[in-house]
Amino acid sequence: MKVVEIKNLTKIYNGSSVQVTAVDNVDLVVEEGEFTAIVGPSGSGKTTLLNMIGGLDTPTSGEIIVGNTNLALLNSKQLVDFRLHNIGFVFQAYNLIPVLTAGENVSFIMEMQGKPKKMIAERTQEILQEVGLSDREKSRPNQLSGGQQQRVAVARALASKPKFIIADEPTANLDTKSTENLLEIMEELNRKENITFIFSTHDQRVVNKARRIIVLEDGKIVKDEQKNV
């Protein structure tokens, strides 16, 4: 089943003296359950493409269809609502709310969705256990290691059961052990629960785990390969 379908997607930034085509007429389909890494040199358009797939940036032209919804047809308020209910995000800088505990950070999205309190409490405990942090539910971000904070971010992204997870350089600030731990957790969630992950990354360790690798150069897809697993 298609989770994301991209047609003729282009993003042009107009600077004061130069026009930059960050994403150049890209076509792409991501199927449910994929574990996909988008790779390429700095400036290749990885983050721009990921941001448009996630509805964080708007294309200059082309279409992004998530499920049966064309993101280009949504106004800004509808787009915020759509992201809230359909897309999970994991960022390089964790983006946890510092005054909230790990459990409260995970619960936050579900509270914004208006889910029942009992369901939120149960889902928070369930997902923290899945990422190996059930004993740190009451800890604030500054009491957690970088790897633990990123696992909380993954738990938060997964809590509302989105259509897919976007992970932008999720291992960039992590040491080797934390990276391996995080990737094992995400790979297990992908295999056991068929959760779709789309990464942008420079990290070879992420590329090694990915089962599909899309290479961008100058805003174009120059390679798209499936690994035999």
Image (cartoon, helix red, strand yellow):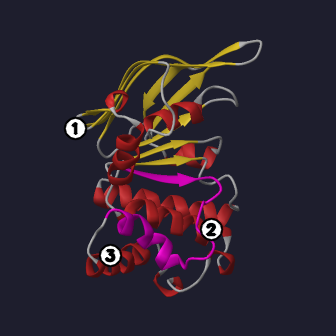
Task: Indicate the quadrant containing the C terminus: top left, top right, bottom left or bottom right.
Answer: top left
Residue at the spot of label 3: 120
**Boundaries of the magenta span:** 87-113
Rounded to the nearest angstrom, the CA distance separating label 1 from label 3 is: 28 Å
The answer to whether residue 143 is visible is yes
Rounded to the nearest angstrom, the CA distance separating label 3 from label 2 is: 24 Å
Q: Residues within 10 Å of mark 1 (few under 14, many from 20)?
A: few
The percent position of residue 12, horizontal first and vertical second, equals 58, 18
Quarter where residue 48 is shown:
top right
Give the mark nearest the N terminus, 3 or 2: 3
Judging from the image, what secondary structure is the residue with disc 2 in? Answer: helix
Closer mark to the observer between disc 3 and disc 2: 3
- As drawn, is 60 to the left or to the right of 173? left
Instruction: Residue at 48% x, 33% y: name it.
Output: 52
Residue at the spot of label 1: 1
Judging from the image, what secondary structure is the residue with disc 3 in? Answer: helix
Q: Is residue 15 above or below residue 126?
A: above
Q: Amino acid at mark 2?
A: Gly
Rounded to the nearest angstrom, the CA distance separating label 2 from label 1 is: 32 Å
Instruction: Residue at 27% x, 82% y: name it.
Output: 118
Q: Would you say residue 109 sits in the magenta stretch?
A: yes
Closer mark to the observer between disc 1 and disc 3: 3
Instruction: Residue at 41% x, 64% y: name it.
Output: 109
Residue at the spot of label 2: 147
Residue farthest right in this picture:
17
Give the mark nearest the N terminus, 2 or 1: 1
